[in-house]
Amino acid sequence: MFFGLFLNFVTVRKNPDGGVTMKISLSWLNDFLPVDTSPAGVAALTHELTMLGFEVESVQRIGRELIGVVAAFVEKVEPHPNADRLRLVTVNHGAGRLTLVCGAPNVAEGLTVPLAQLGAVLPGVEQPLKKARIRGVDSEGMLCSEVELGLSDDHSGLKLLDPADWKPGDPLARDYNLQDVVLDLEITQNRGDAYSILGIARDLAALRGVPLSRPEAPAAPAADGDERVEIVLDPACADCSRYAGQRMSGVRVGPSPRWLVNRLEAVGLRSISNVVDVTNYVMWELGHPLHAFDLREVRGRRIHVRNAAAGERFTTLDGQERTLDVEHTLICDGERPVALAGIMGGLNSGIAADTTEILLECAVFDSVGIRMGARRAGLSSDSSRRFERGVDPRDVEAVLRRASSLVALTAGGQLAGGCADADPRPWQPQPLTLRSARCNAVLGLALSAERMRAHLEALGCECETSAEGLRVTPPSWRHDLEREIDLIEEVVRLEGYEQVPQPDSARVPLGQRGNPRRELLERVRREAVGLGFRQVMSYSMTDPRQLERVLPERPVLQIRNPLSQEMSVLRPSLLPSLLETAVYNLNRRAEGQRLFELDREFHPDPACATGCRESLHLALLLVGQLRPESWQGPAEAYGFHDLKEVVLLLLSHLHLEGLRLLPYLDGVFSANSLAIERDGERLGVFGQLEPRLCERMGTEWPVFALDLDLESVARLAPGLPRYQPFSRQPSVLRDLSLISPAELPAGALADTLLEAGRPLLQQVQVVDVYQGKGVPDGCVSRSYRLRFNDRERSLSDADVDPVVTDLLKQAEQRHGARLRS
Amino acid sequence: MNTLDSLRAEFLAALAAAADREALAAVHQGWLGRKGRLQDLFKQMRELPAEERPAFGAQINVLKEELEAVFMARQEELLNREGVARVDLTLPGHPVRTGSLHPLQQILDRITGIFTRMGFTVEDGPEVETERYNFDMLNTPFWHPARMESDSLYLQQGHMLRTETSPVQIRVLEQVKPPVRIIAPGRVYRNDKPDASHSPMFMQVEGLYVDHGVTFADLKGTLLEFYRRMFGPDTRLRFRPHFFPFTEPSAEVDVSCIFCGGAGCRVCKHSGWLEMGGSGLVDPAVLTGVDLDPEEWTGFAFGLGVERMAMLLYGVDDIRLFYENDWRFLEQF
Ligand SMILES: [Zn+2]
């Protein structure tokens, strides 16, 4: 079935399964459950994730390690006894005091600065820091600028730390440890709940059977009064089932703290400002997209969610004006749209440098609605990708609490009133039944109901024992658990696919039907190879211009969204591409080509359900040198009779009876061509292709080809050959040289001889054709070798002579042929 | 000296005098042939008294055997001396144009051969398909990205080029009551620009088995058997959870690396595993769609890529080589 792009296993470019790639940082994941970042620990984690169904596409170690660097308080600065530019500095590093030599211009008492202690490992330096004697004074450490810490190229002076944030002795690694391990995970289409750090942690905790810890989210301080915004959901708008907004005041927009920037950068996000960064951070962490509005721009302090009008225009945050249709949902304030719901905010209401009051939005939008809306708008965002896969409708309060807590931490601010929450259609749990017997029957396992229950509960399901097994209520974040089979899948996923027995041989039912059509194709391919032809395979899609050169005005099926013009129509014949391949190879030092292709032609046909009649053809082609020049003689080119022999052998090997060869000519096959017919139905054509056409395709060699309709051949159901008893008696041979008018075809005379010589005459072969001295003008002399045989007895001259006399008479009467003396 | 001794002497003299094939043949005819002189002796025997005949007959027979042996030796000697007409062994051989099957055909034949011996029937279907068979019947939601024009190729007149051979499975299930055990090999199409690892057209083999009581274990056992026959008896498989709309549970199938046996190498990117294709139990919705009761019937389905297999087995690093048909490529298979 639709098993992905198998070629994608070579490299991933598109993901037709609808999966997405998400980066997760292991230090971030460590907030939820213990993560071992040693190489062995990462390998074990990779295996756990893989067997949970999250393919690990890459593992990347990023950043540098800061070991032995702590915050230190500068207590005293004194001049260096031996150097004007250096000072002696005494610092408190939490665990004591030490003195060191410092040359930084900005060093001063009362500052908090980074101190590399003895033994510290600094980025880009192999050796741990050692005690140094500088101009006669021992230095027991080093105060650092951003350069030494590897944070930037700024070496103008010591890096200053905020004393409010840093106590002496705090390791700088707390904020400036950029070292982390980042995994690229493939999240399959069905697992919207896993599209976050939390989601991955939840599955891991269930697998390991350990509890999940959530990062603390202390409530942000609250301002006086309650000034929550008014929220109105238009009843006609089906795509928004819940909308919550938290107002915050006293916010100072500015850069984010280093730890926040680090985490965002680790997972591939760019830091913008503290408020915006928090919304992205919480989305990545909890999987629920948020949006922050500048409350100044939310006119009327009112949010109105409605469908867009067809043709309505709206400029999104990226500065692009977009034309919407009724499938889009708009978040509006009292007067105008301020966001394209679930996809992107508006340019008119984003967070600015001087924003002080914000509205944090956390809403639930319909997954299909957002998917279609994003596709229509040609805009896919981190937000839309999450809504498309479904968010947890019950985590809105937790998400807003986490976000407002982080805003308060990084940008100050207070909650201006409670959370406004419109939730007109609250999520309802949908209990399911899991029959334990059914589960085992489908999987081929023998698990107890308790074991199934343990797996499902670990994933957040609520389970009750019922008569048949379990009554299971999936958690609000698992939209993919809708049927019993979905629960069975969860059971086997946590039990482990490797636990399912892998019998040495699966049961095999009774014999299967044969496929005579396929067997015929196999036979034809075998024959063609046996006759010395190489099989080629070309694209079914071809270039209409190319086609026009070979088969003008053929009706073709056109691809609506072709990759290129070269691949924009389906080929109505195998010949053009076969000819193209032959020319391609002739241009690459192939002296002679014997090629065949066996595949489908495509013809427009309204009578077919698909609008297309597909018919299998064999195309076979000869061009160039039959024999290359060698010590045995000069090169020899293929001629019509090389093809004829091949075609007749092929047809005879297929045991087709009653075939007739008739003269044929069309724009593709020249007059040197024959049609193969049976009972008036044409099975195929072979002969020399029109030289003009071959020249247009790039070769001056004569080209000989066969086009055989295998659908017709299959209808004739060529079967097994019928055994013909053969004669064990010796044959008598006679050679006759006959002079006849040159226009008389050799075959016609041979037919006459054969007919007249029956039943003793078995075979007539042309062994020589001669024109010239001794033969009158306009005539030709042909030597026929006649083979006489009788199955019962050995023939003598007395038997053969009267037959020869008779057939000579016939040849003379019917064709004016006479014996050459 | 009796008659027999003189006869022997004469024969040996004549034989020694025979210097070529013709002379040798004349000696044979004159002495050992049907009208030769030894035959004359048998005629003379009839004139002897009856009691002497047996002894004389035995003597003639002994002589005949002796002369035959001498003759054979002499003939051998003469022919050896004569030898064959010598040719120049260093000249090149006569050129012969041989045929060959396309490398993909050879791999496809191998795959279908194994499945056929495992009891699968080979089925065909159209390459121009309706969206109903290509997507709807396979439980692919209307919003699924595979339906987009950026992923699939559609025809101007409507309908599309099949993106997988699974529609064949649906067509078969509509017509045949289970048990059904089939594979559907064939060309499939995707809107992918050709490069070293992508092709807008490639070949797939998909398999389906629907019967009473088919389990996930049957899927694992069947694929294990197939890949062992394909890659050797030590092959191991790994099934990883995945998602496909038409199977549940779904699994990606990895084969222990055929180059390093699982120890890790460049080809398997040091993982020890090679991804081979998807698989899973047929989703109940797919069975319901073809009027089969999922309570009564279960089944499994799987897919694999022919080019992928050929690239691995032949060490081909650019998929476009298969459809370029350069003779310098084709002649290697
Ligand atoms: Zn390997």
Image (spheres, coloured by chain):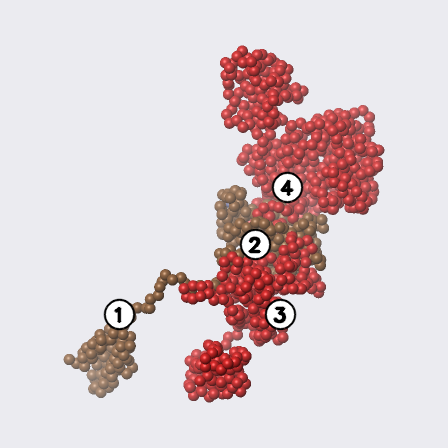
Chain colours: A red, B brown
A428 or A220, which lies in front?
A220
Name the residue carrying label 1.
B77
Q: Is residue B19 visible?
A: yes
| Picture coordinates of residue B268, whole percent (x, y) | 53, 45
What amino acid is found at the position of numbered circle 4 in the picture?
Thr
Name the residue carrying label 2.
B306
Residue B66 location, quadrant: bottom left
Q: Is residue B29 left or right of residue A452?
A: left
The label on residue A21 is 4
What amino acid is found at the position of numbered circle 2 in the picture?
Val
Name the residue carrying label 3.
A666
Q: Are marks 4 and 2 in contact (CB under 8 Å)?
A: no
Instruction: Determine the CA span between mark 1 and mark 2.
Output: 62 Å
- Marked residue nearer the N-terminal end (1 or 2): 1
| Picture coordinates of residue A296, whole percent (x, y) | 80, 31
Instruction: Determine the CA span between mark 2 and mark 3.
Output: 38 Å
Q: Chain of mark 4?
A: A
Q: Is residue A185 above or below residue B177?
A: above
- Secondary structure beneath dot 3 equals loop
- Give a yes or no on whether discs 1 and 3 share a subunit: no
Q: Chain of mark 1?
A: B
- Single out the mark in the foreground, 2 or 3: 3
Q: Is residue A407 above or below residue A479?
A: above
- Give a yes or no on whether discs 4 and 1 share a subunit: no
- Secondary structure beneath dot 2 equals helix
**How dense is the environment of label 2, judged by Cα within 10 Å: few (below 14), some, or many (20 and up)?**
many
At a point 76% along the width and 37% down the height, the residue shown is A346
At a point 48% along the width and 65% down the height, the residue shown is A626
Residue B25 location, quadrant: bottom left
B147 or A402, which lies in front?
B147
